[in-house]
Amino acid sequence: MARIAVIGAGMGAMAAAARLAVAGHRVAVYERAETPGGAVGRFERDGFVFDTGPGLLHLPAVYRDLFVKTGKEPLEQCVAMSQVDPASRHLFADGTDVSLPNASRAGVVQALDGAVGPGAGERWSDLVNRAREVWDATRRPLLEEPLHAERVPALGRDPYPAPPRRGWWRRRSGPLTLAAVAERELQDPRLAALLESHALAHGLDPRSAPASAAVLPYMEQTFGSWYVSGGMHGLAAALHARCVARRVEFFFGAEVVALVEKDGRAAGVRLADGSVVEADMVVSGVAPGRLEGMPPTESAPVPPGRFGVFLALGGARPEGTVHRTVVHGSDRAAELEAVFGTGPVAGYRPTVTVLRPDDPATRPDGEHEAVTLTATVAPHGGRVDWSDERTAADFADRMVRAAEAAVPGLRERESWRVVRTPADVEAATGAAGGGAPAPVLAGRDGRFLRPANTTSVPGLYLAGGFAHPGGGLAHAGMSGAMVAGLVVEGADWRGSQ
C-alpha cells in the first residue's frame, strides 16, 4: 500500500483518487479552495443556483464506469441525470432559428433541412459521418490509452478523411483546418457557424484547429447531452462522496506550492504554510506552472477565457423553453480576432450560450428563473484586463442584449445579475487566463496534445485538463482512469482491454 498525495480536488484528480483508493492505496487530497470540484463550481444567492463551470455532460459513460469500478452504487443512484431534448437551439444572425433533437441523426437532418434549406441536413450528416471516422481512429489512442512518446508522430497526423470530391482537396496547401472543412463541405454560413460554435465553446480557434475537431459535434450528437438535477456541481459532490466512502482523506484550504523530491523521485508536497507532506507518489491535478519543482513541459498557449453572467429573473420559466440556446455572433471575423487575435474586445456581438434548466432546485420558486449566460473571450492578462469594472460591465451588457433573442423581455425580468469574468475564474481556480484547456485532438503535428500522464520524475503523475487527454468533464474523468492504471499496472500499461 503506497501513500499517495493528490494535488487539487478537480474532477480528474478525484477520479484518480477514487480508483487508487479502491486499489488499496492510502490517498490524501490537498485542495486550496474550501469545496471540491475545481472548475465544476456553483454559485448560490437568494435561492438561485448557477453552475460556474460546464453546464452539460456529453459522455456520461466515463462517469458510469468510474462509479461501477469504485463502489456498489451506480452513477444514476448517486445523482439524478436526464437527457436534454432538444439538445440545443441555435439562433443565427440572419434570424434563422433551429432546434436540434438530442442524439437523433435523422432528427437533426430533418431540422436543418427545414430551417436552413433542402440538402443542408445531408451536408451536415455527411460531415458527421466523416467525423465518426476520426472518432474510430482516435478513440482508443487519445481517450483510453496513456500518451506514449512513440504514438505522438501518428497522432500528429489528422485522421479526418477527404470527402469524395476532386479539385479543391488536391489543390489545398498546408494542414486542413476546421474552418476550411466548414467552408468547403457545408456551403452555408449558418452550418459553418454551427460547426465552429463547438470549437469556440472549447476555446479552439476554427481557423487553426485541425479538421479532426469535427469529432466534437459528433460526440455530442451521438452520445447526447445530459444534465444533473440541481446543477452539474452535483456530479462533483457525488464524486467527492464516493472518494470519502473509499476512505480518501480531503484537506481543504490546503494549498500545495511545491513538489518535494528525494533521491530523484517524487517524495511528497510542500504546503503554503511551509509544512511538508511525505508521500510515495504524487498525482498533480493542477496546472504545472503553479507549482515549484515540477518538471518542465512544453508550454502551451494560454487558452481563451470564460465569461459568465448569472441572471436572477422574475416570472416563471415558460413551458417548452429549450435548456440550451446558442445565440451566434453577428461578425465572425471580428469575434475570432477579438478572442484569438489582436482585435478589440469592445464593439462586436459575442456568441452567447444561454442555459435555462427546467430545474426547481435552481430557483427559489416557480415564479422565478435562473439563467446562465456564457461566452468565450480573450484570456485575462496581456492585452485584456478583465478585472477592469467598466470593461467587464460593458461586455456583460452586450451578452445580455444578445441573449434577449433567446429570452424575450430579459432585461425587464432581471432582478439582479452577477458577472464572473476570466479574472474571477483565474482567482478561483488558478487557471491562467481564466479559461480551461480544450480536449486533445489529433493532427497539426501534435500541437493539440497535452502532456503525458507520466513525467520525467518517477512517482509523479498528471491528471485533469492540463494533462492527457485534455479538458472537459469526460476527458478529466478519463485522465483519472489513466493515472490509476499507470500506478497500479506500471508504466507499460496500455489502457483497459
Image (spheres, helix red, strand yellow):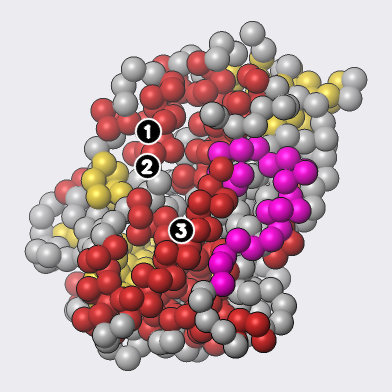
Instruction: State the residue position of label 2.
Output: 60
Location of residue 496 in the rendering, given as x and y in whole percent from the top left corner: 55, 29
**Span of residues in magenta:** 141-162
Q: Looking at the image, which residue sits at the far top?
A: 1
Percent of width and height locating residue 27? 59, 18
Q: Nearer the viewer, residue 373 or 390?
A: 373
Amino acid at pointer 2: Pro
Residue contact at pointers 3 and 2, CB within 8 angstroms: no
Residue 416 among magenta residues: no
Asked whether disc 1 touches disc 2, contact meaning CB atoms under 8 Å apart, the reply is yes
For the residue pair 119 and 420, the one nearer the viewer reads as 119
Distance of mark 3 from mark 1, alpha carbons? 22 Å
Q: Is residue 488 above or below residue 457?
A: above
Q: Position of residue 461 (x, y in %)?
A: 70, 32
The reply to whether residue 29 is visible in this rendering is no
| Residue drawn at the location 12% of the way across and 65% of the way down | 320
Mark count: 3
Mark 2: secondary structure? loop
Q: Quadrant of the C terminus?
A: top right
The residue at which mark 3 appears reads as 132
- Crowding at mark 3 (Cα within 10 Å: few <14, some 14-19, many 20+): many
Q: Residue at x 60, y 88 (%)?
A: 167
Amino acid identity at mark 3: Arg
Q: Looking at the rendering, in which quadrant would you find the N terminus?
A: top right
The alpha-carbon separation of the residues under discs 3 and 2 comes to 18 Å
Characterize the local packing of mark 1: few (<14), some (14-19) or many (20 or more) Cα atoms within 10 angstroms: few
